[in-house]
Amino acid sequence: MSEFVKGLEGIVAAQTEMSYIDGEKGVLEYVGIPIGELSAKSTFEETVFLLWNKRLPTRSELDEFTSELRQRYELPAGMEQRVTSLPTNAEPMHVLRTMVSALGMHDAQPNEIELDRARRKCLNVLGHAPTIVAYFDRYRRGLPLIHPDRSLSFAENFLYMLNGEKPTATMARAFDICMILHADHGLNNSTFAARVIISTLSDVYSALTGAVGSLRGPLHGGANEGVMKMLNEIPSVADVESHVMGKLERKDKIMGFGHRVYKAKDPRASDLQGLAEQLAKDTGNEDLYAKSHAIEQIMEREVAAKGIYPNVDFYSATTYHCIGLKLDLFTPMFALSRIGGWSGHIIEQLDGNRLFRPKAEYIGAHNAPYTPIDQR
Ligand code: SDX
């Protein structure tokens, strides 16, 4: 029997052709293309096609994929009523988890897992998820729902449904870049969860529901909300040093820093840093960026030697805030994008499946007696 490795740290549990990560050098590629190339030149729709098909689309293929996705912006009949019957104080990640699961009950054949069928179900969830989040946010604010507009891109349409007006080109592009950067990242916890679930030949909706549940954890996708809470707690740049040093002395984890794989700066953090700096200037949030940058400088001085650097969540917080998103929508944003990556892994897992069933090392007693209850 192999030795027990806590948290499966460093264990190779799957093969993939989607993301390549070099943790030491801080390199991330999607199907071999450096993430910086994609964030500069691609779109979220094209990136999802790339991840699912392992190649960039021709223009006509992209047009067809985009059209298929936009046909799924609107929710299936009955789903809108489900969203607007939820408690208005529900946490958006709980709403998303519950509604992804509910989508399976609005699919006539929810359990089909032949590759082309599974892909279509993934596309259903990719198209419907932004509408679920936007509808719930409008509903909890007591505002009329804004139905999707198929003439808009994924990024434009989400911001339109959320705010009731079409976003500026700058904001739409900023959100599109965030979606590209969060789409896939190897065998992270939520992706592993999706692969484990689909490996029993369960259904796509169950696998994606489990992945959403994993992502909300503060050690994973929930960290971006933790970063924003920390930034809001620090009154000014002048207070950053004492705040961060206090946390480090208490052995508190600084949200948005550290990574199981990266021991250099997460390349996505670098991209998001540039976006955050520009948007902070454009929206009068310079103090937010200044606090973030000051935190990074202190962490560089104090813990870079331990391989602790900013990860994707650190500057995404300022970026999402400047785009105008509420704090408790930050992790749902991560999920909207990662449905693309989770789906690609579901398809990869189904294409040559092997049930995940690791072992547990038994470290308890043996040959123990059964003591009758009146003698215990
Ligand atoms: C994501 O896996 C992925 O790819 C995930 C992701 C993706 O795209 O899917 O990249 C997205 O989840 C990014 C990570 C978001 N989480 C956070 O920002 C939460 C804060 N980070 C930490 O909790 C931590 O860094 C983890 C969970 C991300 C990684 O933790 P590990 O690999 O289990 O490392 P560890 O907790 O064992 O820490 C090793 C040492 C410890 O110090 P010592 O006890 O050895 O003295 O580093 C320290 C830790 O205390 N440390 C930190 C720290 N992270 C690690 N110290 C202060 N602040 C931190 N953030």
Image (cartoon, grey):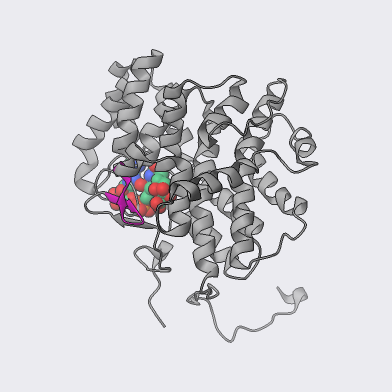
Q: What span is in magenta?
A: 27-36
Q: 172 left or right of 244?
A: right
Q: Is residue 342 visible?
A: yes
- Residue 11 on image: x %, y %: 37, 68
- Residue 223 on image: x %, y %: 45, 39
Depth check: give the residue in front, 83 or 306.
Answer: 83
Depth check: give the residue in front, 261 or 130.
Answer: 130
Q: Residue at x 45, y 35 (%)?
A: 176
- Residue 300 on image: x %, y %: 21, 36
Decide: is 192 above or below 360: above
Q: Quadrant of residue 291?
A: top left
Q: Which residue is most to the bottom?
A: 367
Q: Residue at x 77, y 57 (%)?
A: 108
Q: Quadrant of the C terminus?
A: bottom right
- Is-magenta flag for residue 372? no
- Secondary structure that dominates the magenta span: strand
